[in-house]
Amino acid sequence: MKKTLYAEFTAREGAQDDVARLLGDYARKVREEDGNLAFDVYTKASDPRAFWIFEVYRDEDAFRTHVKAPYGAPFNAALAPLIEEDASVLTFLDELH
């Protein structure tokens, strides 16, 4: 079964361009993962500091592989001081059939 989620966070005032650059680099790496089916990055139309990332992985194993990727921890460490939350807020989704 696919593993689907979205991550959300808010860039600190004045940091949205840095967050966008960081996310762009990270997204390219994630999209190359064998088990990644989608990694779509958005900003909220009414608030460009609000970021939403829609992620889909082939299955739980592909998601676990993603979490263990060597570029994940450095990305999160670089992101942490640029956002208002302590970390990305994750919401896991189940597809309706």
Image: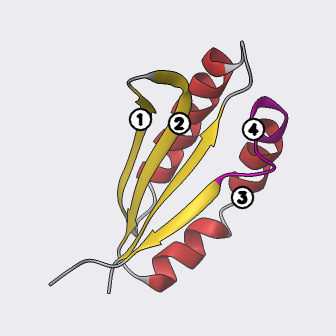
State if disc 1 and disc 2 touch (CB < 8 Å).
yes
> Disc 4 or 2, which lies upstream in sequence?
2
State if disc 2 and disc 4 touch (CB < 8 Å).
no
Whether residue 38 is situated above or below residue 21 in the rendered picture: below
Question: Residue tagged by mark 2?
Answer: 51
> Disc 4 or 3, which lies upstream in sequence?
3
Q: Amino acid at mark 4?
A: Leu
Separation of marks 3 and 2 at Cα, in angstroms: 23 Å
Disc 1 element: strand
Q: Nearer the viewer, mark 4 or mark 3?
A: 4
* Dominant secondary structure (helix, strand or loop) of the stretch shown in magenta: loop
Disc 4 element: helix
Q: Amino acid at mark 2?
A: Phe
Name which residue lies at 85% across and 34% down: 81
Q: Is residue 83 magenta?
A: yes
Please state which of residues 32 and 44 is positioned toward the viewer in this rendering.
Answer: 44
Disc 3 element: loop
Q: Nearer the viewer, mark 1 or mark 3?
A: 1
> Disc 2 or 1, which lies upstream in sequence?
1
Residue 41: x percent and y percent?
43, 39
State if disc 1 and disc 4 touch (CB < 8 Å).
no
Separation of marks 4 and 3 at Cα, in angstroms: 15 Å
Q: Amino acid at mark 3?
A: Pro
Q: Amino acid at mark 1?
A: Tyr
Q: Residue furthest left?
A: 97
What segment carries the magenta color? 80-88
Q: Nearer the viewer, mark 4 or mark 1?
A: 1
Question: Residue tagged by mark 3?
Answer: 70
